[in-house]
Each structure stands twice: as structure tokens, then as C-alpha cells.
Amino acid sequence: MSILKLIRWKNLLLIALTQVLIKYALLEPFASTTTLSNFEFFLLVLSSVCLAAAGNIINDIHDIEIDRINKPEKVIVGKAISEKTAYNLFFALNIIGVCIGFYLAMAINKGPFFSIFAIISILLYIYSSFLKQMLLVGNLVVSVLVAFTILLVGLFELLPAITKMNQSTQFTFFKILFDYSVFAFMINFLREIVKDIEDVDGDYKEGIQSLPIVLGRERATKIAFLLSFIPLAAIVYYTVTYLYHQQLAAGYFLMFLIAPMIYVSIKLFNAETKKQFHHISMVLKLVMLFGILSLLLYKFILPH
């Protein structure tokens, strides 16, 4: 159970769910051609989950002192699991994730794609080691990596199968995936800032240059409030532009994405306590989940 908590199994489940829905709710029913077999796709999801789990572990190892201040009840490394065991898990998961990536790159005759998995692995380590201590850099890196879990499916499923005949269709679906990745980036970036405000005490003692430490908690909260309007405006624009004639989809976006984002903006306007920021962070996580689940709506939107 401690290992599941250490690897953040709920976050890993969200990554797996995202990639599975992309293939089986969007690409398989509607895209003209996909590349990976079911087994190869399972390996792609497994690789993504292994690398993300390794990233979560190394993050916890480097955050032991910070977590003792911010969330002492959730400290795992050094308590339930030894630091040596955590490091061994980190290396094992990285090796599995990168080796699977190498196999998949060879399987689709795109050898250079192997470097994607190696770069993700290295970036997650560098993020935990020192990037997270730099103003906004860590927030941006982790948000880009979250967004990339969506694009990764497109790179392996759509790109190798492009021909002159299906080029237009493949790029249309790649654009849909790009839109979802931008959504994931915006929501995650906002959530990263909210979490920084929530964890300001421990971060300050460890010398991390987060936004609330550099500018102050109050100013950082105002910036987060203003930033919350960007994904809100983007979702409203997407709904009005593409879904206005699809009542079911428009209703879903209104109820499960637009309304919660308005709620987040209102809460950010006067949030002050650690508990309030944690609540906002959880709502943003739900927005991310509902955004991903909207992939199930494409069977009602797109012609078969």
C-alpha cells in the first residue's frame, strides 16, 4: 500500500485512462489508420506509467524535508519505505520505461522516437533535483510533460501511419490531441501554482524560489486568479465554436468544465488558508479528469 502511495497510483491511473480513451474512444473508431497493435499500445501505456511513477518517487526522495513541514502525515520515504528501496524502485521503473520505449520505437521503424523516453526520464530527474527550485521553470516543465502524455499517443499511433491519402484526416486528429494537450497544460500549470501557494511554508525553508515565495502569497494568489480565466476562456471558446450545435457535448462542457472553472476563479479571488488552496487544487484535478472523459463524447459528435 505504501508503494502505491509513493508512486501516486491515482495520478498514474489518470495517465493510463487518458491514453486508453484517446486510442479506443477517439482514434480507433474514427481515425483512418492507427499504427500500434493492442499489445504494443499496452506497452506504450505501461512505459508512460513507469516513467511517471519513477518521477514521483525521485520527487518524494528529494522532498523528504519539505514534506515533513508541508504534509508530515503523507511522508513515505524514510518512514514506510527506506530511501534505498525508493531509489531501487526509481531505477527499476526508469529502466523498464526506457527499454519498452526502445522496443516500441524499433517496432514502428522510428528509431529516433526512442530518445523521447530517455528525455522524459532525464527531465523528471533534473526537475526533482533542481528545476523545481527555479521560479516557474519547474511548473512549466511538469505541465509540459503532463501535456505530452496526450501527444505521445498521436506520435506513435498517427504519425507513422500517414500517407498522401489519409494525411488530412491524420492531421485533423492530431490537432484534436494538440487541443487536449493545451488544455492539460493550462489546467496543470494553474494547479502547480495553487499547490505552490499551499506548500509555501516548507518550500521557503528549503530555499525553493516558487511564485508565492518570490512575490508573496497574496500576489501569487492574484496571479493564479487571473490565470484561471485563460483555461476558462479557452473552454468557452471551444464550446461555442465547435460544440454549439451538439447539445449533449455543450451541456457536458458547461456543467463539468466551465462551471467548475468559474467556481475555481471565485474561490481563488478570496482564498487564504492552506485548506482552501488544497480544495481548489482538488477541483482542478477533477476538471482535468472531466476534460479527459469528454473524449467519450466523440461518438456523438463525429460521423462514423
Image (spheres, rainbow, N blue to C red):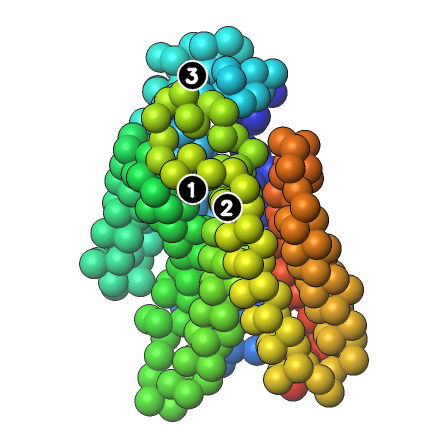
The answer to which of marks 2 and 3 sits earlier in the sequence is 3
x, y (%) of residue 10? 60, 38
x, y (%) of residue 140? 38, 50
Identified at 50% across, 46% down, the residue is: 219
Identified at 37% across, 46% down, the residue is: 136
SS at badge 2: helix
Q: Which mark is residue 219?
A: 2
Q: CA distance from mark 2 to mark 3?
A: 26 Å
User: What amino acid type should be assigned to the residue bearing mark 3?
Assistant: Glu
Identified at 58% across, 63% down, the residue is: 229
Question: Which image quarter: residue 95?
Answer: top left
Q: CA distance from mark 1 to mark 3?
A: 23 Å
Q: Which mark is residue 24?
A: none
User: Is the residue 92 above or below the residue 229 in the image?
Assistant: above
Q: Residue furthest bottom?
A: 165
SS at badge 3: helix
Q: Is residue 27 left or right of residue 232?
A: left
243 vs 186, nearest the viewer: 186
Q: Is residue 54 left or right of residue 1?
A: left
